Amino acid sequence: MVRRIIEAALRSFAVRKNVKFGFGFHVGPGSVLWAPRSLTIGKDVYVGKNVTIEVDGEIGDGVLIANLVGIVGRTDHDLREIGTSIRRSLWVGNDPERLSQATTIGSDVWIGYGAVVLSGISVGDSSVIGAGSIITQDIPSNSIAVGSPARVLGPRFTDEELDEHWKKLRKSGHRILIGKPVSEA
């Protein structure tokens, strides 16, 4: 009972405007989630401590976002506004139609400690992003990506393992209701 009250309090401080989340959502202390227009977060998603998520888009089911991760806009401020300091330039919150870029994090994704995912990016289902990585381009499903800027090292699972992984996720009665396996997409 006390744990539920604490989690509800943390969510009320962390989850700001235009964010919806599914069952089993956890958010750690010091985290902030906000969207210029709309951010939808799936079921059984864990967001660690001191995480900043300030983008439009979607985060799938069964996602693990480690501490100090940033999922942030690459065009949050109009850096080409002549005669205006960057501090006073047009901000995404004032003009989301022009400055916001939707971001998609698939289901069954792990984003490691201190990683940064820039807006407009898609991270495919069942991928792993290494700690400290900076994601500047799309990451395919079932990939392990690391570095700054991040590059794909290889697959997380073989095709056969991936199929078995998704079958077991669906069968297990687990809280997540992940979509089609990558190999069936």
Image (cartoon, rainbow, N blue to C red):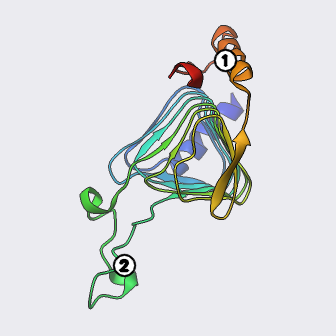
Residue at 73% over, 54% down: 113
Query: Residue 87's image quarter?
Result: bottom left
Give percent across and percent down for residue 148. Answer: 66, 64
Confirm whether residue 35 shows in the render.
yes
Compared to residue 170, the image places residue 143 above or below, namely below
Report how far apart the C-alphas of labels 2 and 1 lie in the structure: 45 Å
Compared to residue 168, the image places residue 146 above or below, namely below
Compared to residue 120, the image places residue 84 above or below, namely below
Q: Earlier in the sequence, mark 2 or mark 1?
A: 2
User: What crowding class fits label 2: few (fewer than 14 Cα within 10 Å), some (14-19), or many (20 or more)?
Assistant: some
Q: Name the amino acid type tagged 2.
A: Leu
Give percent across and percent down for residue 77. Answer: 37, 72
Give percent across and percent down for residue 120. Answer: 43, 53
Depth check, front residue: 146 or 87 = 146
SS at mark 1 in the image: helix
Q: For mark 1, what is the residue?
A: 163
Query: Residue 178's image quarter?
Result: top right
Residue at 60% over, 45% down: 10
Q: For mark 2, what is the residue?
A: 79
Give percent across and percent down for residue 150. Answer: 65, 57
Q: Residue furthest bottom?
A: 83
